[in-house]
Amino acid sequence: MMKTQLTYFFKDIFTKSTIQNTKQKYPIKLNNLKYKNLIGNKHNNKLLYNFRFLFASSLLTLSLNVSSSDTQAFNKDAYLDLSKPYTYNWNNTQSYTKKDNQANKLLKQVGTTIGSTVHSAIGSTNSDNANQFGNKITTGIKGQLKNQAISNVESRINQKANEYANSFGKGKTEISIRKITSKNPDYSLRTIQPLTPLNDDSTELTFVQAQLNSGENFGERKSTLNLGVGYRQLLEQGQSIAGINLFTDYESKSKHKRGSVGLEYQRANFNLNVNKYFPLSDKKMIGDDTEDPLAGYDVKFSGQVPYLPWAKVKATRYIWDGVAQPNVKGTIFGIEVQLSDSVRMEFGSEDNNTVERKTYARFTTALPLSDHESMTSFSISKKAFQNSDIVNLGDLEFVERSNKIRVEKLLNGVTVVLGEYNAPTKGASCTLYNSAGVALGTSLTGDNGQVDLKGIALIPRGLVSVACKGGTYTDEATGKLIDLGQMVIRAATIYSGTGPLMMLSSPLSEVAYQLADTNSGDRTVIAKAIMRQNIAVAAAFGVTGIDITTTTPTDINTNKATNDDAGKFGMALAAVSQMGENSADSSPAETITALVADMADGNIDGRVVGKQTVDMTTAMNNFSNGEGANNITDGKGAGNVIGVTNSVAFITLGEATTNTYTVVLNTQPTGNVTITPNSNDTGAATVSAAMTFTSANWSTPQTVTVTGVNDADATDETVTISHTITGAGYAGVTSANVIASVTDDEIFFNNLVYSTVTSPDTGKVWLDRNLGATQVATSKTDSAAYGHYYQWGRNDDGHESSSSAAVATIASSITNAGNLFITSDIDWTNADTSGALRTVAWADGGANDICPAGFSVPTEAELTADTIGATTTNITNIDTVFSSFLKIPTAGYRNRANNGSFHSAGSLVLLWSRGTNGVKAHNLNISSGTATSSYIDHAYGFSVRCIKN
């Protein structure tokens, strides 16, 4: 029974292994294997001796299958996933689910061939069966002998290589060369060499460790070089070793570089290693992928299982910092069993947040084996730990670390097309920028005015812009070649974060960009306004509904404009060129400046700016009367034709607010005409009901009401309102769309989403909760609404958290005070005794600004006016202050002494203003019976509510 179980155990589990070579072992002789008592009795000793061939065959099979199968684990060169089913059908050699190595395939095939052929031979007298039986046996034996020969050669090469390498120096070297008959043999070389004298009396050691090995990383064969230097010291009277090490890693194919710093602690019965990794190279383009080397750390522990000297518990915790994807966090836990002096078996599991949990088992065999190799005695020791006092620097243990460079691999999935169009502009240098203003890539436009930007792995959701500088184009109005020199033309839009991106800059997009940029390049401001301005500019130039940042205009110089988006956009750009010609502009920049000034009221009026006449009708007439085949308009307008006129092309509104526009018929109908507004996103904005026009009221505008929906996100949204028209004489008539921009009142700040509330007394806008609170207070004792506790005038450096520790060391700066709550009788800093600097620092944009952009800590007057000075709600105690529009909870305070202890939560409201009387800071103090304005020492931790400037 035991023989059967062991046979299936080795057959079904150990299909992969790791073979390492060390200088301490002797040439392997399988027929000389000896076994010690397994559990202490002669019967089992004899039984194991009978199975020596089984163990030897298993080791031979394992020696032919050496590969790196899991690059995301730590040194898991031999890996078997036990979390998946494993089956084998002896009647069908193709039904197993695990891919076998060469040796296992051979043994299974030979076994199957022999079994099935003998069965056939016994059951039949057909001579062909006998011949087939003989041929298969001959072929199988030849293959087996070939593999055995290769294995012997590999073992011999590894043995000689290790003997030769370890004949030099005083260190330790391990060499392994495998798969010598393949096109790409696997290899591994690692060495550790002392740099300082090393003997039995040494208490310090400086060493160098190097490793070069092949293997796979994300499915690709890559060679990695690791080079490090370390220092170890014998401590605790020789009972432990502590050390530090520095490593650099280099991956040959990708040219990734990485550094690390590590700490290690060794005792006779356990080891602990902590390693911090940091990339030294940027992302690399490799084929269709982009790879980013990742920073991270790992903590590795291994130690003897108490009372089981032949077993170790091994655990690893690792975290890799994602770049475009979430951080990778995982744990590996395993048990290692010493089967003999040279053979170890490990089994365990790995669990991380990016893949399913995996179990594994692996054999590790150190070759060559000793002539006197013996099995471990699996007995229970009387002592919890053996040899607990023995450590030796001379053991030269290799540093435990992750030697493969962990990368984040992404498909180059973002197709980016940039372009510039006055007319198609050649040779313009176009640069793409993300929402933070970071350049993502630059390239030159071709003859068609466009360029495909390569190598963009990821573009975050939000504002994106393109700036195109220089280039040449043929002016549509004059036919002259224009060199733009250093002139820059920009375009911007809001990117969804997925899919291809096209960004085309033109004079129209530059006008929209300048109109959106109302705060000197503040990209947050641009992001809020750019979509509205793109739409407004398109409407002003007669191309309503056309996206001026993605539509490729018709080249009027070489093609006839047709009645489509490209043709209309091309004609609008031609009109801009004609405006410049009419005004004798020296460059397109002059024309754009005039257009920006003229668009201040949202329309192109024909207003004269300096010498420039900015007039669409004149420009179009002049252009249409010129030479060429582009006479698609006479500039006289549509006249009184059947149609519908909207009062505006664009409206703005906030969530839970409304705005209106009107529609009217152009001509008197013969019967009733119905116009039905339709919102393309009713989750963002809804519209009022259908309107009916009669032959009597057809010329009276009717109102469409648009209502913003107060949704759960914090994103501004754009809604397109179309109009369905039915009725006598108006069948098939279309109407221009109206674009509604719905502004969200929610504010993202420090990983929280705030809304705003408006004072019924002063009209001031406040955040709807205390800074740091996760929700608006539902009661005066709602702890989730308490928020942070700030020391007066101090930055949000971490001290404000209710979980921050306390320290008694006074800060010497108001801007760099660390992240601990500073306890003091008076103040947390000695750098600003009057408080004047911190009054300024707590304002919007100040050095210690803790509020969202556009908000500040309130002044004394602002805080008083909307609390104890309010008239709508007479605030006299903690009940009335909660019932006010601010809904302030009783958060209490953090003490300036007693190690920063917390007091009065549930019974007291204390709010800072940024006011000071020179020594103490102003605050609002509201209890169960009083509500007062007072002054107190700066070191207390109070709540803060921000007000909009």
Image: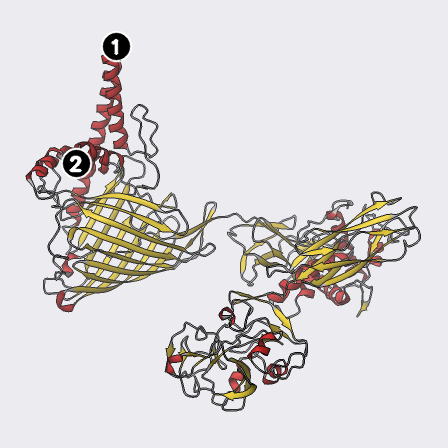
Residue wearing tag 1: 124
Label 1 crowding class (10 Å Cα cut-off): few <14, some 14-19, many 20+? few
Name the residue located 47 percent from the left edge and 89 percent from the top edge: 833
Give the camera-side residue of 922 and 866: 866
Q: Do the residues labelled 2 and 1 touch (CB within 8 Å)?
A: no
Q: In the rendered view, would you say 215 is above or below 917?
A: above
Q: Where is residue 891 in the image (x, y as percent from the top left)?
A: 49, 76
Tell me what residue is drawn at x 65 percent, y 67 percent: 517
Q: At numbered mark 2, what does the secondary structure look like: helix, strand or loop?
A: helix
Residue closer to the observer: 518 or 632: 518
Q: Which residue position is annotated with label 2?
A: 55
In the image: residue 117, left or right of residue 726: left
Q: In this view, does 129 lie above or below 52?
A: above
Q: Position of residue 617 (x, y in %)?
A: 84, 57
Name the amino acid, label 1. Answer: Ser
Mark 1 lies on a secondary structure that is: loop
Percent position of residue 367, x then y: 17, 43
Q: Position of residue 447 (x, y in %)?
A: 64, 48
Is the N terminus in the top left, top right, bottom left or bottom right quadrant?
top left
